[in-house]
Structure formats: C-alpha cells, structure tokens
Image (cartoon, helix red, strand yellow):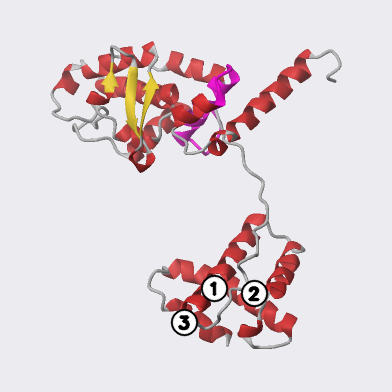
Amino acid sequence: MKDKFIRHLKFEKRVSSNTIKSYGNDLNQFLTFSERYENSKEILSIDNRTIRAWIIELSTKELSNNSINRKIASVKSFFKFLVKRKLIQKNPATLVQSLKTKQSLPLFIKENDMIELFKNININNTLEEIRTDLVLELLYGTGIRINELINLKTKNFNIKKSQIKVLGKRNKERIIPLNNNIIIKTKLYLDHNKRKKYNSDFLILTNKGQKIYPMMIYRTVKSCLSSLINSEKYNPHLLRHSFATHILNRGADLNAIKDLLGHESLAATQVYTHNSIEKLKETHKKSHPRAN
C-alpha cells in the first residue's frame, strides 16, 4: 500500500527528483508508524490522532524541531494529494500544527568594526576600487537588498534632496535618505573617465560596462569583510542587518526602520530588537553597580 501511493506521488510533474527522494523517505516513515500504531494497513483509516502520536514519537528522538516540521510538511502534502485525487474526503492533517522553532538572530558587524573597515579601504583612484567602496557604502548606508542595488539607476538618485528611490519587492517603491559619504562617492564614481565611457542607465557596472550581477557583489563584500570578521557568512545581507541594528541602537523608531528596509510588516523588523536588547543587557552588566 505504501509503495503504491509513493509511486503515485512520483507521477506529479511539479515535484523534482530530489524533492521526491526526501518527500518519500519522510512519508515512508510515517506510513510505517501508522501501520504499527493502527495495527492496520489501511491508509484511509489514518486520522488526526495517528498523526499527533507520530509527532510525539518523533519528539522523543534526537531530531531538531526543524527536521520534525519538515516531516510534518511532507505528511500534510501527502494528504492534500489524496484529497485532490478524491481518494479521501477529509484531510486529517488540517489541524496539525508545526513545532515551535528557535528564531536565529540576524548576524551583524559591530559599529566600530564598520568604521575601521571604511577607514582601511584603499582607494588609488581606480574605477574598481571606487566601485568597491561605493557598493559597501550603499549596502551599509541605506540597508538596501542585493537585487535593489543591482537594479539601481542613475536617475534614481536625487542629489539635491539627498535621497534615492528604490524599487523593492513586489515592485514597491520607497525613498531612502542618503548620507554625505554616499553622495560624494557616487559623484566620484560617475565622474570617473572610465565610467563616463559606458552608456548604461544602471549605476553599478562591471569592468565591461554591463549591469553588475549578484556573484560579483558577493565577491566584493567577501574580499572586504574576510579580514574584518571570522565567519563563513560573508553575505552582503550582513551589511543590511548591520545597518538596521546600528540605527536601532542609536534610537531610531522601529516603524521608520521598517519603512527604510521595505518590510511588509513590523514583525519582520522586530527581529532586530533582540540584538538591541542584547546590547542593553551588556551595557547594564558593565554599568550597573549591582549587575554582578
């Protein structure tokens, strides 16, 4: 019975071969449990009680909640498939909830380290070095995403108003103020003789005058951050997280940060408050006479 249903799943063209392999293993474990728990090989007899009992058993093993949740998702998808094929009328997994997982805090670079980073960047007036400096300044100074940086156009800059227009997710535009460093470095980049030769509306270009691409930004950021922090995650998003964390620590309103980052809801922005709270705890421990 198990093999029969798993074979059916493999005919679903929307599921890749890699997904099928993982999906089938999780599903097979559940069906094996259900046969033992129900003392029956009839899949149609499985109910909500069986699924909950399986989750309880999984919780007693050395599995993370993320791993268990993946298995739960597989089972839920399985029963949706059965309902869609009209093999069952009611989905027994509808009310089954995933386990709570610990939310990881976004990594960020310390403010003093960012200051030192910009101090130590060597600029010998080559277009490549000016571009590297500008890329870091834009990512950290505005908190924009990688794709937003890639699609920035020169017309998006309003030097007089010291602001930039960014096209974010779902084609939503937002206005971000610019600091003097970004304005100066943008002018320096655009006024470079080599940059003037390129006929492109996009701001940041490759050495061949083409639109910059994600891997190039990753390499640029990694080359600068590798000497600053000991981490395998030299993701450009580190600079976005650092931007949000630093301005929050300096008293910025959470709603204002939400708008600057282009978040859909405040919930996505609130994750940065955890980093801010950790800083408060550290300050309290160092400063309060009865903290120790």
Foreground pick, 196 / 83? 83
Residue occupied by mark 1: 78
* Coordinates of residue 161 in the picture (x, y in percent): 32, 13
Task: Give above or below for 149 relative to 195.
Answer: below
Q: Could you tell me how far apart the alpha carbons at marks 3 and 2 are, in whole angstroms?
A: 17 Å
Q: Could you tell me how far apart the alpha carbons at marks 1 and 3 are, in whole angstroms?
A: 10 Å
* Coordinates of residue 283 in the picture (x, y in percent): 72, 18
Q: Is residue 57 left or right of residue 8?
A: right
Residue occupied by mark 2: 30
Q: Are marks 1 and 2 in contact (CB under 8 Å)?
A: yes
Q: Earlier in the sequence, mark 1 or mark 3?
A: 3
Using a 10 Å C-alpha cutoff, classify the residue at mark 2 as few (fewer than 14 neighbours), some (14 to 19) or many (20 or more): many
Q: Which residues are magenta?
A: 228-254
Task: Give above or below for 289 relative to 220.
Answer: above
* Coordinates of residue 257 in the picture (x, y in percent): 50, 26
Name the residue rendered at 29%, 30% in the picture.
Answer: 152
Using a 10 Å C-alpha cutoff, classify the residue at mark 1 as few (fewer than 14 neighbours), some (14 to 19) or many (20 or more): many
Residue 228 visible, this orientation: no
Query: Does the magenta run of residues contain 247?
Result: yes
* Coordinates of residue 129 in the picture (x, y in percent): 31, 21
Residue 112 visible, this orientation: yes
Name the residue rendered at 48%, 82% in the picture.
Answer: 7
Task: Give above or below for 126 relative to 60.
Answer: above
Q: Earlier in the sequence, mark 1 or mark 2?
A: 2
- Please tell me whether mark 1 sits on a helix, a strand or a loop: helix
- Please tell me whether mark 2 sits on a helix, a strand or a loop: helix
Residue occupied by mark 3: 8
Q: Amino acid at mark 1?
A: Phe
Task: Give above or below for 271 relative to 38.
Answer: above
Quadrant the C terminus occupies: top right
